[in-house]
Amino acid sequence: MLTKVDDSALDKLSIRDEEIILNGPPGHMVGNILLQNPLDIPLKIKNITMQDVKKTRGKKTSSEYNPQLILNTRFDAREQRLEPINLSLPYDTPPGNYEKLIQVGGKDRKVRLIVQPTIEIAVHPDEFTFQDSHPGTVHLATLTVINLGNLPFQIPEIKHVAALDMDYLCRALGIAFREKDTEGLTATLDRATQNIKENLTNWADTRVTEAGKILEPGDSMVVNLKITMPKNANAYNDYSGNVRFWDKDLSFVVKSHTNAVKSKKDAK
């Protein structure tokens, strides 16, 4: 038979720890608790509610959060076990040490929460498509940046990115093999390398309009990313690239303009 133990019946359990410590980022606090079932019947434990530490010598040593330690586990009769525990706090909980209390077996036990500093952001969207690969064309991407950490986040400065011709490697190897296939491997690779250099564009000038602004935990901001096509870009080619936005990888493609392709065909 299973007996469900709720907060009001936790005095049936026995706890061996004088202090329970949970450590980690707010969304993933981990620790252990040593519990014993002193009864001759099995027990199913759901959760233990934490409470604020009462005023001690006129000072408060508690946080504003009173979460629950979720266990959802079964103890056999007379079983003692070190049970892993996880706790999720609001993601913008400031770094620091917080004290709570739990009451198990009729005794108060201190719970120490060590919240680690965390920098985490979300960026939406992370893929962009532009049209017109003419040299000097400025493309604008509008991003939404959300601060999911517990520290202020500074919008990063980005100065340049690589805008690569999507076919330049295939073109370089194809030309090399057709022109130098009878001259051996060295000559073929030399020709491929030369063609890669001829088709490799300069850096694409990139600017973040809001660079340097501070985004507080839990806040979001619209950010404008400007990418200028290199001076030696080819208006008839398609390009792709990646933008490193702190630890996020944003990708973009630039499609050659329809009029540019049409003009190329007309010229032939």
Image (cartoon, rainbow, N blue to C red):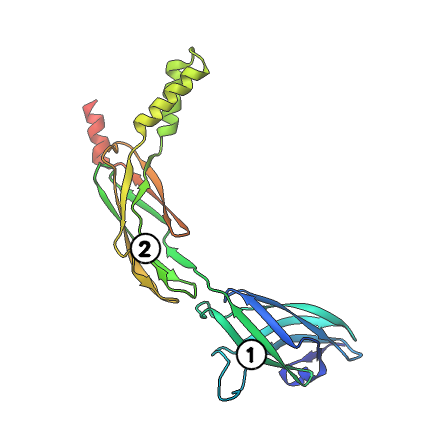
- Three-letter amino acid code at the position of disc 1: Lys
Q: Report the residue at 32% width, 62% height from top.
A: 214
User: What residue sits 36% from the left and 66% below the top?
Assistant: 216
Q: Residues within 10 Å of mark 1 (few under 14, many from 20)?
A: many
**Residue at point 39% right, 62% down?**
147
Mark 1 or mark 2, earlier in chain: 1
* Rendering coords of residue 106 (x, y %): 68, 86
What secondary structure is found at the residue carrying circle 2? strand
Q: Residue 68, how many percent across, how many down? A: 57, 75
Write the residue at 47% across / 70% down: 90
| Quadrant in the picture for the C terminus | top left
Relative to 239, is 150 above or below? below
Q: Which residue type does callout 2 highlight?
A: Leu
The correct choice, above or below, for 47 with respect to 134 in the image is: below
Q: Position of residue 9 (x, y in %)?
A: 67, 84
Q: Can you give x and y, in whole percent of width and height, for residue 209 in the image?
A: 25, 54
Circles 1 and 2: CB atoms closer than 8 Å: no
Which residue is denoted by mark 1 in the rendering? 100
**SS of the residue at dot 1?**
strand
Query: What residue would you read off at disc 2?
Result: 143
Q: Nearer the viewer, residue 66 or 259?
A: 66
Q: Quadrant of residue 143?
A: bottom left
In this view, which residue lies farthest toward the front? 57
**Quadrant where the N terminus lies?**
bottom right
Q: Nearer the viewer, residue 7 or 33?
A: 33
Marks 1/2: CA distance? 40 Å
